[in-house]
């Protein structure tokens, strides 16, 4: 079974060695997405704004790979500051609604100006 590399039209080609997503069979892995727009400019200066943009970017990769958030089993959220957890949680809950996938939140260093990164694992029917 071969791999399909996902490059949404809304995303600039990654400037680091990764694919935005990879699908093999019914499994789709979305690489860590950040709050970049199509010109690689950061969208938003708050955790709320960046979380919403990042989830929009995850959604675009999912859709380009033939999936939706309903297919997501696991999201991993990477935050730069433990004090951002509540704000991210509120934006995350508002964006996803209910019936949340599994999630892990990890605290990391990200490039300057980026506050959140999210990756996803989806299994399609």
Image (spheres, helix red, strand yellow):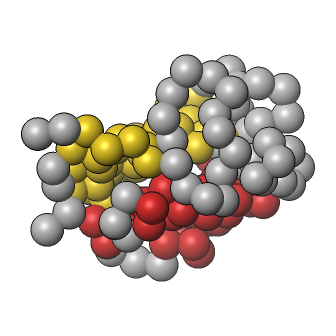
Task: Point out residue 31 in the picture as x, y percentages from the top left corner.
Answer: 47, 38
Q: Quadrant of the C terminus?
A: bottom left
- Residue 82 seen in the current view: no
Q: How many marks?
A: 0
Tell me: residue 41, above or below residue 71: above
The residue depicted at 25 percent of the width and 39 percent of the height is 3
Rendering coords of residue 104 (x, y %): 40, 41
Q: Is residue 18 above or below residue 125?
A: above
Please state which of residues 68 and 7 is positioned toward the viewer in this rendering.
7
The residue at 88%/49% (across/down) is 45
Residue 124 appearing in the image = yes
Dividing the picture into quadrants, the one containing residue 100 is: bottom left
Residue 112 found in image quarter: top right
Q: Nearer the viewer, residue 121 or 102?
A: 121
Residue 57 locus on image (x, y percent)? 60, 56
Q: Does residue 101 appear to the left or right of 48 in the view shown?
A: left
Q: Residue furthest bottom?
A: 97
Q: Relative to 91, is 6 on the left or the right? A: left
For the point 80% across and 42% down, which residue is it? 40
**Residue 87, image quadrant:** bottom right
Rendered position, 79 above or below 101: above
Q: Residue at x 38, y 70 (%)?
A: 68
Image quadrant occupied by the N terminus: top left
Q: In the image, is residue 107 above or below residue 86?
A: above
């Amino acid at each position: 079974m071969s791999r399909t590399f996902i490059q949404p039209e809304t995303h600039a080609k990654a400037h680091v060695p990764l694919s935005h997503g990879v699908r093999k069979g019914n499994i789709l892995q979305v690489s860590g997405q950040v709050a970049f727009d199509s010109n690689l400019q950061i969208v938003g200066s708050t955790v709320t704004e960046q979380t919403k943009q990042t989830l929009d970017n995850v959604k675009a990769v999912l859709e380009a790979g033939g999936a939706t958030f309903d297919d997501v089993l696991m999201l991993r959220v990477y935050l730069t500051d433990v004090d951002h957890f509540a704000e991210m949680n509120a934006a995350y809950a508002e964006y996803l609604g209910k019936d949340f996938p599994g999630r892990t939140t990890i605290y990391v260093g990200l490039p300057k100006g980026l506050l959140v990164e999210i990756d996803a694992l989806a299994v399609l029917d």
